[in-house]
Amino acid sequence: MSWTLKGSYAETCSCELMCPCNLSFHHGATYDYCRATLAFQIREGEIEGTDVSGCKAVLGKNPGIKVLSDDQDGKGSREGGLTVAQGYLTRFPKIDAIFAINDPQAIGTDLAARQQNRTGIVITAVDGAPDIEAALKDPGSPQIQASASQDPFFMARRAVQVGVGILSGQKPASTVELLPSKLVTRDNVADYKGWTSDRSQ
């Protein structure tokens, strides 16, 4: 597999300094187990021709877009999104848009904006989950504008298909498979086939 990556990496674990795994797996964990946290920030790179540099590389090519902050952890939750957005809204008098890492965080962000009577902010996210479907249909949440959908049903089905193929001796055509994603907006949410849609056909 061909790949190239540039970025930053940080880790911490429950073992004594330094982490034995960085030296050799033969050393074993200090306390017979290892609890680790790994963090990666990929600035640029590709894996077998697939660009993995992320949205920051694209934003960097657009001088009209200024990223105000990218260092807060909203915990991927509604409460975390609320807390982080409250800080942003207090810190920055003008915010045009907020991109949340998932739908719950976007919903928390919207709540923070409404609590502070801030308008004119485009809020977008990733998942296309049932909660964001409801928010996109809700006239009371006009600032939530879009979510790039994932399809758990299709992802699981493809995983089983690939797994069965491997067990049958069929090597996957590629180690990376890009699955289709639909941008769900207020304009097309009525036609969106979401997570809870009937897949029996």
Image: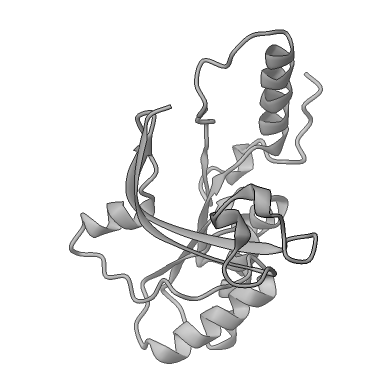
Percent position of residue 55, x then y: 37, 53
Percent position of residue 82, x then y: 61, 78
Query: Would residue 111 be seen by someone viewing this image from the given angle?
Result: no
Q: Quadrant of the N terminus?
A: top left
The extreme front residue here reads: 27
For residue 32, which quarter of the picture? Answer: bottom right
Left or right of residue 140: residue 66:
left
Query: Residue 18 or 146: which is nearer the viewer?
Result: 18
Query: Residue 185 or 7: which is nearer the viewer?
Result: 7
Query: Residue 28 or 60: which is nearer the viewer?
Result: 28
Q: Residue shown at 62%/38% (left/top)?
A: 192
Left or right of residue 69: residue 131:
right
Query: Would residue 137 be seen by someone viewing this image from the given angle?
Result: yes
Query: Residue 15 or 126: which is nearer the viewer?
Result: 15
Percent position of residue 187, x then y: 51, 47
Q: Residue shown at 46%/83% (left/top)?
A: 88
Q: Residue shown at 63%/70% (left/top)?
A: 75
Left or right of residue 25: residue 180:
left
Q: How is the image coloured?
A: one colour
Q: Quadrant of the C terminus?
A: top right
Q: Residue shown at 34%/82% (left/top)?
A: 94
